[in-house]
Image (tube, helix red, strand yellow):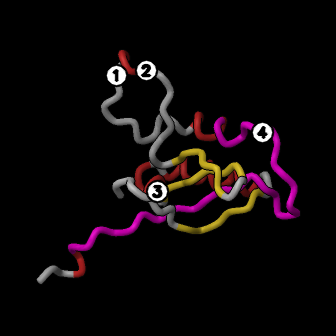
Amino acid sequence: MADIADKPQEAREFFIQGVTSDGRTFRPSDWAERLCGVMACFGQEGSNRQDAHLRYSRYVRPALLEGVKSVVVSEDLRKIEPLAYHFVLNFAKDNDLRIVDACLLPEPGQRA
């Protein structure tokens, strides 16, 4: 019988949505891509010069959620790089962006 500790943990994430607390759309329109581009260096083990094009980090990635530009942030970033985690969180707070605590489920047909 499998121990409860053997079960894989669900990924904990939060979403930063491109909407302010008063409902206005955050500008510039490419804010999510810019923020994720700054964070792209975190979580890129094994990259090499031949494959040097930009890839978003698995810890901070852009998403379109219900028609709203958003950034999905993995709680794992806090463990590997606390300063980067706080940078992203403070970006959202400083710009009065909506933060939603959630877990993103894989699309049907994708492996978890």
Q: Residue furthest bottom?
A: 1
CA–CA distance in space, label 4 to label 2: 26 Å
Q: Give the mark nearer the N terminus: 3 vs 4.
A: 4
Pointer 3: what residue?
A: 107
The quarter of the picture where residue 38 lies is top right
Determine if the magenta segment contains residue 11.
yes
- Earlier in the chain: of badge 3 and badge 2, it is 2
From the image, tell me which residue sits under label 4. Answer: 29
Magenta extent: 6-33
Mark 1 or mark 3: whose residue is earlier in sequence: 1
Q: Nearer the viewer, residue 84 or 65?
A: 65
How far apart marks 3 and 4 lie (CA) works out to: 25 Å
Pick the front one: 50 or 68: 68
Q: Are marks 2 and 1 in contact (CB under 8 Å)?
A: yes
Which residue, given by chain and number where applicable, does mark 2 sit on?
52
Classify 99 as above or below 48: below
Q: Tell me the amino acid under the disc marked 4.
A: Ser
The quadrant in which the C terminus is found is: bottom left
Cβ–Cβ under 8 Å for marks 1 and 3:
no
Estimate the x, y position of residue 21 in percent, counting from the top left. 83, 63
Where is residue 96? Give x, y as percent: 79, 57
Q: Residue furthest front?
A: 109
Q: Secondary structure at mark 4?
A: loop
Say which label, 4 or 1, has the lower sequence index. 4
